[in-house]
Amino acid sequence: MITLIAAVGEKNELGKNNKLLWHLPDDFKRFKNVTSNHYIIMGRKTFESFPKPLPNRIHVIITRQKNYAQEGCLVVDSLQKAIAVCRHGEEIFIIGGGQIYNQSLEIADKLDITKVHHTFEADTFFPEIDTTKWKLTSSEFHPKNENHLFDFSFDTYLRK
């Protein structure tokens, strides 16, 4: 199973200047719980936006840079190679960025989307979800509170 996991704004905003646009502790906890002990595939810029590799996950980094290496990470030069290095039968999570999401949307089985109910200024976007190809199977609304500046929903889509 290939799952795209992302947090997006109302207009599919992902980030700006390689940074997230919001801070939602419950989304971070969910991301950690869902992706722990799995492969996570990402572009180089997404990887470099982390202060350090995320614990309890196998990192697969896609980059066109020759001789790019990160200790404890698998580095490849294409999405196809990234998927190929993952153990067969394991759930794979694609975690960004925008170019990688665009390349992988047609091969994904599932979309795990945190929809932040606000619009933001952004330079990176998640692709449009075509509801003729994807079915929303669950949605869990969370109102803003003292730890979360915005309302958000955890939405799961499965390929039709």
Image (cartoon, rainbow, N blue to C red):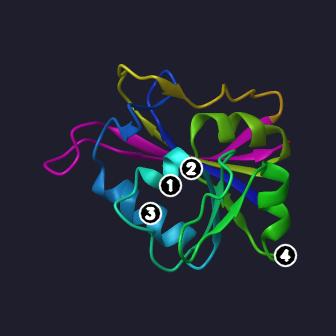
* Residue 149 coordinates in the image, percent (x, y): 21, 39
Magenta span = 134-159
Do residues under tags 4 and 3 come within 8 Å of each other at their CB atoms? no
Secondary-structure class at tag 3: helix
Q: Amino acid at mark 3?
A: Arg
* Residue 9 coordinates in the image, percent (x, y): 44, 30
Residue at image mark 2: 44
13 above or below 93?
Answer: above
Residue sitting at x 85%, y 53%: 80
Cα distance between the residues tagged 2 and 1:
5 Å
Residue at image mark 3: 30
Cα distance between the residues tagged 1 and 3:
19 Å
Give 135 or 81, whichever is nearer the viewer. 81
Quadrant of the drawing holding the C terminus: top right
Q: Amino acid at mark 1?
A: Phe
Q: Is residue 139 visible?
A: no
* Residue 23 coordinates in the image, percent (x, y): 27, 46
* Residue 50 coordinates in the image, percent (x, y): 39, 57
Q: Which mark is residue 97?
A: none
Residue at image mark 1: 47
Residue at image mark 4: 89
Cα distance between the residues tagged 4 and 1:
24 Å
Locate residue 88 relative to residue 82 in the image: left or right: right
Do residues under tags 3 and 2 come within 8 Å of each other at their CB atoms? no
Secondary-structure class at tag 1: helix
Task: Point out the frontmost of discs 4 and 2.
Answer: 2
Earlier residue among tags 1 and 3: 3
Secondary-structure class at tag 2: helix
Q: Amino acid at mark 4?
A: Gly
